[in-house]
Amino acid sequence: MPELPEVEVVRRGLVNWVRGRTIISVDVLDPRSVRRHLLGPEDFAGNLEGATVIDVVRRGKFLWMPLAEAQAASAGTAPGSASGQNMRPVVAVMAHLGMSGQLLVEDAAEPDEKHLKVRLRLSPSSGMPEELRFVDQRIFGGLFVTSLVPTDDGGPGGLAEEPLAMIAEEASHIARDPLDPHFSFDAFYRRLRLRKTGLKRALLDQGLVSGIGNIYADEALWKARLHYARPTDTLRKAEALRIIEAVREVMLDALAAGGTSFDSLYVNVNGASGYFDRSLNAYGREGQECKRCADVGLASLMKREQFMNRSSYTCPVCQPRPRNGRW
């Protein structure tokens, strides 16, 4: 499943190509891809047609596009921009990418992709493709219309061009992610200390901190020199800050590289795969030298262990397992 940097790459692409444009028509080619919209494909299309995408918002791995009715949109700004003051959305179309979902912008003349599921035709805009396509081979993802609700803390719902204190209802239960300007380290640390669990398990808890998946958890733990089984109630504040800073650094590096893609099915809105996997220091490196230890002349091979039906990769030398470690 795409992790936070991949989803942020998609968000930025959609901002450039879709924000401020009106959805002219909707073709649902496979009803399974709108199954989360419980009122069915016709209602899904009816909610979108004539509405304007006023922004693209991300919290953690959740991605949604707030919609304004055509009448409200006419009072707004030009295509390619939007004003939260002029267009107060109450609904959004949420994209769940699942294992293989792709949002692609294409010219109408381009042939349909083999696994095209939903097509949105957009209002004309100079030099911009006319269609937004949802492609999904494995059909674990999908699109659906959701309500926007006020945020619990009164802050923005997520990362956006013009943030509003509204959040997609399905994302309202998750915490802010480390790249969110409104992320509170102090609040995170207080809640982390109360968890009394292993550090990696806590990092994967979307109710504590969102957007951290298995790959980036391993990379951040390696960078912070902390073992995944370290009990959270033993973490000093400086150590907790070190892991959050490591998460941010790893994600920003991945974002600059276009995301991490181990699957040819994952591409961004322009059809380009991520390539940060070439720079991984921990994940997938079982039996290979620890790069950090090798730099100082130590011989240490990366180790893989089973963790929550997945794998964790650590260096036994610079990430020693704690005696009282918890899974």
Image (spheres, grey):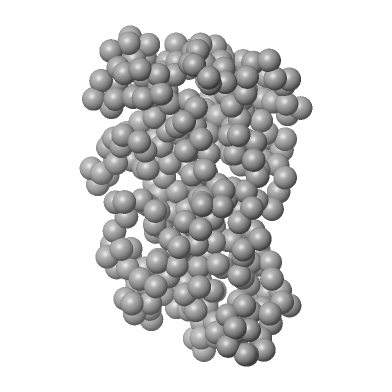
Write the residue at 52% across / 89% down: 323
Of residues 188 and 52, the one nearer the viewer is 52
- Spot occupied by residue 319 in the image (x, y as percentages of width and height): 54, 82
Q: Residue at x 45, y 15 (%)?
A: 22
> Please, is residue 55 above or below residue 275 in the view?
above
Give the residue at the far right of this rendering: 114
Residue 275 visible in rendering: yes
Image point 64% across, 53% down: which residue? 275
In this rendering, the answer to whether 13 lies above or below 288 is above
Residue 43 in view in this figure? no
- The image quadrant of residue 318 is bottom right
- The one nearer the camera, 211 or 103, is 103
- Left or right relative to 266: residue 123: left
Q: Residue at (32%, 68%) from the top-left corner?
A: 189
Occupied quadrant, residue 234:
bottom left
Image coords of residue 225 (percent x, y): 49, 79
Residue 264: % across, % down = 72, 45
| The C terminus lies in quadrant | bottom right
Relative to 297, say whether 250 is above or below. Answer: above
How many marks overall?
Answer: 0
Q: Is residue 127 above or below residue 97?
A: above
Q: Is residue 178 left or right of residue 286?
A: left
- Given residues 256 and 195, the one toward you in this image is 256
